């Protein structure tokens, strides 16, 4: 569930909003001081910040600016910010939106309105770090693919260098073994039949025993599974073989 930081020095209001948000199922942290808020926002991955403007320590607009323009010592975490403003503070609203707030709500407000704006902000501005890491993992995988590098656990096959290692240790393979391993690595989680493997490794015009596939699988198991104590190529009885990514 989303983690929301409430920055509000009016304790009664902060408490009220906290109770309502917790009731809705959000995880909530609250604080009543601008400097403390900045520190919390820098060191924690919130999904949303509700930020009052008139605060002790550091005012809300300054907190907002610093969150959105972090120095190098700050993290990249930039949760969406909804400002809590006084009724007539038009300048605050304008400055706040200029400084990167996604929305503002004027005090006093109906709690239903606040909850609605919170839902909208979370939906339109998802920040969670999981997305970021998944994104960078996907990028790394794309880089690998572009460089002809394929991996399974500690195993790495480098197509360009025609090199295979496990946890950095060199594995010497023949051309056919190398080709077969590459077919497995590029088709992880797909069960490959003997015919498919034969075709991919030996070519369409291969004439000979189909058990050549089993022979190469055995060679690979001897050189990889047995040496590195893993179970890489699994037998799917009556069908063929598979490398499972997990
Ligand atoms: Ca205040």
Image (tube, helix red, strand yellow):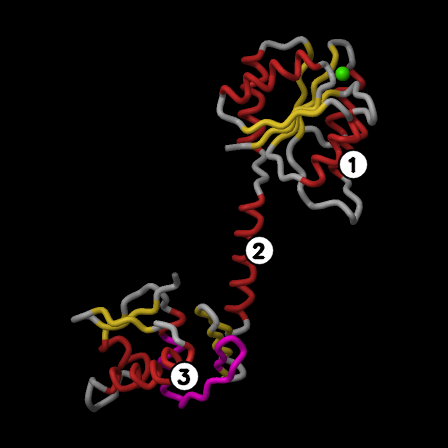
Which of pointers 1 and 3 lies earlier in the amino acid sequence? 1
Would you say 49 lies left or right of 157 here? right
Q: Is 39 drawn above or below residue 190 in the view shown?
A: above
Q: In the image, which disc is placed on residue 156?
A: none
Marks 3 and 1: in contact by CB < 8 Å? no
Question: Which element type, helix, strand or loop, lies under badge 1?
Answer: helix
Residue bearing mark 3 = 178
Q: How far apart are marks 3 and 2 (CA)?
A: 29 Å
> In this orientation, which residue lies closer to the viewer: 115 or 205?
115
- Residue visible at 46% across and 74% down? 155
Magenta stretch in the rendered image: 164-183
Would you say 178 lies left or right of 214 here? right
Q: How far apart are marks 1 and 3 (CA)?
A: 53 Å
Quarter of the rendered structure image containing ligand 1: top right
Would you call the spot at circle 2 few (<14 residues within 10 Å), some (14-19), or many (20 or more)? few
Which of pointers 3 and 2 lies earlier in the amino acid sequence? 2
The percent position of residue 205, horizontal first and vertical second, equals 25, 87
């Amino acid at each position: 569930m989303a983690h929301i930081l409430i920055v509000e020095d009016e304790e009664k209001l902060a408490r009220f909003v906290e109770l309502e948000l917790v009731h809705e199922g959000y995880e909530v942290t609250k604080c009543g001081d601008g400097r403390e808020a900045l520190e919390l926002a820098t060191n924690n991955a919130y999904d949303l910040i509700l930020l009052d403007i008139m605060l002790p320590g550091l005012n809300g607009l300054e907190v907002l600016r610093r969150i959105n323009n972090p120095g190098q010592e700050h993290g990249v975490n930039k949760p969406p910010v909804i400002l809590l403003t006084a009724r007539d503070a038009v300048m605050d609203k304008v400055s706040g939106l200029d400084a990167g707030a996604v929305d503002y709500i004027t005090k006093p407000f109906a709690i239903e309105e606040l909850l609605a704006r919170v839902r909208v902000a979370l939906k339109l501005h998802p920040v969670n770090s999981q997305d970021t890491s998944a994104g960078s993992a996907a990028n790394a995988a794309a880089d690998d693919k572009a460089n002809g590098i394929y991996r399974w656990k500690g195993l790495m096959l480098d197509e360009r260098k025609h090199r295979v290692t496990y946890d950095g240790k060199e594995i010497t393979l023949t051309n056919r073994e190398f080709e077969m391993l590459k077919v497995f690595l590029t088709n992880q989680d797909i069960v490959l039949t003997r015919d498919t493997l034969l075709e991919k490794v030996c070519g369409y015009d291969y004439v000979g025993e189909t058990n050549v596939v089993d022979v190469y699988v055995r060679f690979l198991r001897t050189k990889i599974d047995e040496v590195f104590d893993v179970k890489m190529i699994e037998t799917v009885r009556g069908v063929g073989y598979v490398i499972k990514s997990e």
